[in-house]
Image (spheres, rainbow, N blue to C red):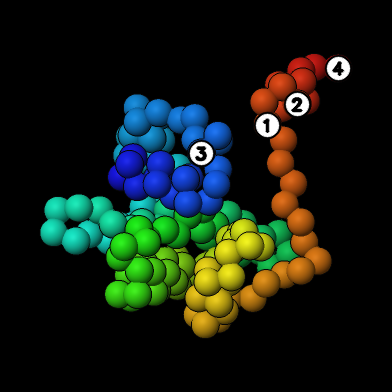
Amino acid sequence: MWELIREHAEYENMIDEFVGSVESLKRHLFGLRPVGKCLVAVDGEQVVGYALFYANYSTFITRPGLWLEDLYVSPSQRGKGLGKKLLKAVGKAAVEERCARIDWVVADWNESAIRFYQSMGGELIEHWRICRITGEALESMAKPD
């Protein structure tokens, strides 16, 4: 799983942001209080794809949703329907948990992923932008006034 996440970071040209650890991954996803769920696609004993998601909530519709953090299939395994199976499994989890929606982001340069998501019913929401606070800015924000 760890190597597949690294492969995903390389594919997205984000390897400089790949700074976590196996121990942290185990603790947060597979420990006593998992923060999310992870589904995997396997070929034999090799993990070749994964979908990682967790709960969120919409105050406007007053229902839970799921945030799809990652959906990734190794390039050598694409075209076999694994991504579709993973996304459908996330959809099944959302319906079972009575979620109103699934949200995620996709890189604007990743045309094949955009086409895939649209073929599955995904909509691009053009008027929204991602905001993020990390590192020193986050530490500074958390300090008392």
Q: Nearer the viewer, mark 1 or mark 3?
A: 3
For the residue marked with disc 2, what is the amino acid? Ala
Q: Quarter of the image holding residue 35?
A: top left
Q: How far across and down, in percent of the image, does residue 5 sit?
A: 40, 45
Residue 142 visible (yes or no): no
Dot 1 or dot 3, earlier in sequence: 3
Look at the numbered discs 4 and 3 and tell me whether their residues touch, using CB distance below 8 Å: no
Dot 4 or dot 3, earlier in sequence: 3
Q: Quarter of the image holding residue 1?
A: top left
Q: Nearer the viewer, residue 1 or 34?
A: 1
Give the labeled residue for mark 1: 134
Image position of 98 (left or right of 127): left
For the residue marked with disc 4, what is the amino acid? Asp
Q: How far across and down, in percent of the image, does residue 91 sit?
A: 44, 71
Give the labeled residue for mark 2: 137
Give the labeled residue for mark 4: 145
Q: Nearer the viewer, mark 4 or mark 3?
A: 3
Look at the numbered discs 1 and 2 and tell me whether their residues touch, using CB distance below 8 Å: yes
Look at the numbered discs 4 and 2 and tell me whether their residues touch, using CB distance below 8 Å: no
Mark 4 to mark 2 CA distance (whole Å): 14 Å
Q: Residue at x 46, y 30 (%)?
A: 20
Q: Residue at x 40, y 28 (%)?
A: 21
Give the labeled residue for mark 3: 15
Q: Residue at x 46, y 67 (%)?
A: 94
For the residue marked with disc 3, what is the amino acid? Ile
- The residue furthest left is 44
Neighbourhood count class around disc 4 (C-alpha, 10 Å): few under 14, some 14–19, many 20 upward: few
Q: Residue at x 74, y 46 (%)?
A: 131
Dot 4 or dot 2, earlier in sequence: 2
Look at the numbered discs 4 and 1 and tell me whether their residues touch, using CB distance below 8 Å: no
Q: How far across and down, in percent of the image, does residue 71 sit?
A: 45, 59
